[in-house]
């Protein structure tokens, strides 16, 4: 999994004299390679720098274990530190949806996979946790998006709020809340409108909906392949709306996963799930080990 970086690092260490402990110079030299690997994996520069500095302090002076080479040892220290950074508090993928009906607000840019992810998560909550879920689309400007959610609902056997033409997103949110209470649902999910880029109108709309339902979870859906842009999106949504977690989609693609590390470092919010395809079953709990492996590639 980490062959590339290991190989690079063993080259570095071959040139250094063997000592009983990792010296500051050894570690510095090795971490230069680590930094390049992080940047190649699309980790943002300040995050890569902070990360490398933290690892440097941890690694310097560590006794060299006999069973592995100094290069492998640094890789292990880096790998463990990556996992620490990537892992949020609490159980991976756990959602705060105890008091029914619990609102989940889904936010993100158009095309990020928000509607698909809403349905995938609803299916998961229904099948894995035995929850009764109600979904509603608030994308009043795109009737096709509202219909898409309704079609997915039928496909996965999850109810969607009947579409009433002419309602505002806040009116739909209120109606969903009422319907969820009356209908005895455990969870209701609001698929907010997306835009191609963040704009003031979108943010105001999401804020208004948030204030009406007080979501238990606000999940930001971001395209894992968009790298630095994804990090910027996460920062903007978190500053403005306050997110509780992230779902990274398109992790079945060949992205290196550096965005996950940057996002975690920049927002402090956990990545809860990853999307691994277009099918309704392809949503998995985020596993820091897997992403750490991809970043070190
Ligand atoms: P929205 O505009 O954010 O609601 O995006 P959609 O949910 O309509 O998704 C846009 C496209 O991305 C659709 O074709 C989805 O099937 C696809 N998609 C969503 N999540 C994933 C994923 O994890 N992997 C892949 N490969 N495709 C995805």
Image (tube, helix red, strand yellow):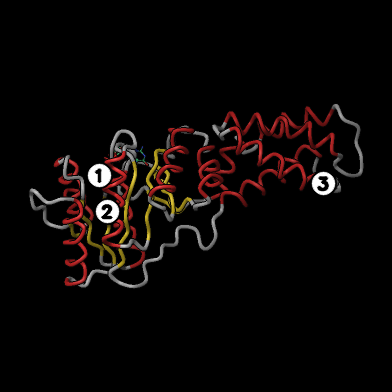
Sequence-wise, the earlier of marks 1 and 2 is 1
On the image, which quarter does residue 291 sit in? Answer: top right
Of the two numbered discs 3 and 2 in the rendering, the one whose residue sits closer to the viewer: 2
Mark number, residue 67: 3
Q: Please give the residue where the numbered disc 1 appears in the rendered image.
A: 193
Callout 1 touching callout 3 (CB < 8 Å):
no
Dot 1 surroundings within 10 Å: few (below 14), some, or many (20 or more)? many
Of the two numbered discs 1 and 3 in the rendering, the one whose residue sits closer to the viewer: 1
Q: Please give the residue where the numbered disc 2 appears in the rendered image.
A: 208
Of the pair 49 and 83, the residue shown nearer to us:
49
Callout 3 touching callout 2 (CB < 8 Å):
no
Residue 69: percent from left, percent from top: 81, 39
94 lies above or below 249: below
Sequence-wise, the earlier of marks 1 and 3 is 3
Distance between mark 1 and mark 3 Cα atoms: 55 Å
The residue at 68%/34% (across/down) is 34
The residue at 15%/45% (across/down) is 147
């Amino acid at each position: 999994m980490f062959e590339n970086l290991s190989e690079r690092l063993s080259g570095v260490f071959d040139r250094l004299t063997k000592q009983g402990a990792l010296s500051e110079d050894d570690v510095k030299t090795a971490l230069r390679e680590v930094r390049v690997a992080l940047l190649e994996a699309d980790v943002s520069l300040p995050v890569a720098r902070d990360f490398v500095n933290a690892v440097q302090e941890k690694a310097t002076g560590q006794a060299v274990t006999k069973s592995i080479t100094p290069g492998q040892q640094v890789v292990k220290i880096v790998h463990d530190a990556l996992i620490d950074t990537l892992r949020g508090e609490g159980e991976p993928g756990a959602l705060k949806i105890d008091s029914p009906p619990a609102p989940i607000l889904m936010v993100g840019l158009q095309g990020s996979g928000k509607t698909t992810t809403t349905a995938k998560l609803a299916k998961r909550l229904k099948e894995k946790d035995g929850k009764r879920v109600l979904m509603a689309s608030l994308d009043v400007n795109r009737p096709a998006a509202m219909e898409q959610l309704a079609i997915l609902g039928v496909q996965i056997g999850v109810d969607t709020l009947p579409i009433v033409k002419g309602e505002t997103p806040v009116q739909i949110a209120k109606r969903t809340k009422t319907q969820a209470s009356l209908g005895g649902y455990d969870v209701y999910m609001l698929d907010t409108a997306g835009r191609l880029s963040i704009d003031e109108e979108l943010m105001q709309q999401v804020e208004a909906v948030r204030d009406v339902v007080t979501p238990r979870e606000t999940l930001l859906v971001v395209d894992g392949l968009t790298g630095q842009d994804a990090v910027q999106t996460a920062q903007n949504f978190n500053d403005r709306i306050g997110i509780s977690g992230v779902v990274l989609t398109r992790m079945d693609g060949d992205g290196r996963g550096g965005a996950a590390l940057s996002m975690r470092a920049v927002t402090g919010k956990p990545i809860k799930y990853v999307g691994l395809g277009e099918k309704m079953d392809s949503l998995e709990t985020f596993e820091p080990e897997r992403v750490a492996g991809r970043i070190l590639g």
